Image (spheres, grey):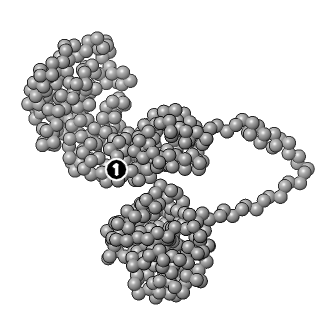
Amino acid sequence: MPAIDLARLRKQANRLADFFFLPDEFMKRLRETLDFYVNYTLRTAENVAPGSNLKTYRTPPAVLTQIENELRPLAEANPQFALDLADRLWDEGALETRLLAAFLLGRIPPQEERLLPRLTAWTQQIRDPNVRSALLSTSLTRMRRETPAQFLNLVREYLHPARARTWANGVQALLPMIAEAPSDNLPTIFDMVEPIIEEAPSTLQDDLTDLIVALYRASANETTFLLKHILSNAKNPMTVVTMRRIAPSFPQPLQKELRDLLRPQPLFEIKRAEEETAGFVADEAPAPKLRARKKKMENSKIIYLHGLESDSQSGKARRFAEQFPGMVTPDFTGSFEERMKQLKPILGRRKNWTIIGSSFGGLMGTVFTCRHPTQVRKLILLAPALLPEHFGEYLNLETVSVPTVLIHGTADDVVPPAPVRKVAEKLFTNLQIITVDDGHRLQKAFGELNWEEILE
């Protein structure tokens, strides 16, 4: 391999870019350039990339980088020709040409309707780890940065519970977005990956390691909280097993935080349980079954969201606080968006919240629950402002199965019950409706309802 003369390499790459609009001629000149820089000390008889089935020129990465730099402005200005050239490069079937094809996809606008079909087809065809990584990172660069909602929808498809074979793709695609933190998308990402971490398939160990390390670097506290919650409530035995295997790759502070939860169960405890079972005598009267103790409600995870012109000192807020000492009754001010921003740090990443939302607070509770259903154990809506004609822009939400109770007065002249009920029935599959003879403020009904039973 000749020494790389940067001036000469730039001229070669620039000359190659002249054939951008002629894919066949471009390929002919590209082969010549790649052959010129072949590292014959590494080239094998089979000429196949390690861990891959692709042929390779063994060309130094600096050569491809220079070619990419020359192609970048042309591809961004001419996406149609970039797509044609990417197809030709992919069909060539070499490691270097497919890496260039993946690069060109990343310069095409995310609105191009043929981009996703190419990406889907190519990721299904390839097993080379370098090309796969490029397709899931470099090829999605513009979509990830310019249309993050479209990008996250694609990742959701990869992480769909019924498509376990594409989970690795979803995880790898998320890594660059996580690395670009601080990101407003982190809460959404945590919600998306939680079921995958809970499932923890052994075939996904390397990808899970990359994911958890990336999340920890982006938000150490949230990642630690999430993993502790998953390990403390794991019903799948593989969760702890997989986590124990990959934990040595975690940052040291995270390993320390998880050490007790990952410790194997001592054998003597299992043995003792077996001995007690073996020593049971059939003639002896069985010990009376203890009645299951009712789990005490955790008031610190009950939150009351007041109405538009109300506050934490309103009648309902004070009566709730008296009946459930320790519950959260914050104040909110400003527009709906501002109030949701104020709510976010209060709820954080904690699970098992019981949210009580009154009027405008009911709209807030509904939007949060539909966006973060895994954080909410129950939603109580008191005459909620679920009015499409006023707040329709906030009500385009996914249906959720969170247990929800809607309490509404027949004499409510502020928030009409009929349209609210229609919206609630659309959004909540596990919905209980309680109709009372009262007005919007529910002053009479408040003292008559059994709140412990409703919140249970």
Taking 60 as reference, is 428 above or below it?
below
Residue 18: image location, x then y, percent: 8, 30
Q: Which residue is mark 1?
A: 183
Side of 253 where 186 appears, left or right: left
Q: Nearer the viewer, residue 438 or 227?
A: 227
Q: Nearer the viewer, residue 185 or 426?
A: 185
The residue furthest front is 313
Residue at 15% x, 22% y: name it: 6
Q: Quadrant of the C terminus?
A: bottom right
Residue 63: image location, x then y, percent: 20, 24
Q: Quadrant of the N terminus?
A: top left
Tell me the quarter of the picture where residue 258 sits: top right
**Residue 203 at least partly seen:** no
Q: Nearer the viewer, residue 277 or 312?
A: 312
Residue 378: image location, x then y, percent: 53, 66
Taking 290 as reference, is 129 above or below it?
above
Side of 295 where 403 appears, left or right: left
Residue at 22% x, 25% y: name it: 62
**Residue 61 at least partly seen:** yes
What is the three-letter code of the residue carrying label 1? Ser
Residue 202: image location, x then y, percent: 52, 36
Q: Nearer the viewer, residue 359 or 305?
A: 305
Q: Residues within 10 Å of mark 1 (few under 14, many from 20)?
A: few
Residue at 38% x, 24% y: name it: 51
Taking 262 as reference, is 31 above or below it?
above
Q: Count the marks: how many?
A: 1
Side of 381 where 88 appears, left or right: left
Residue at 13% x, 38% y: name it: 73
Secondary structure under tag 1 reads: loop
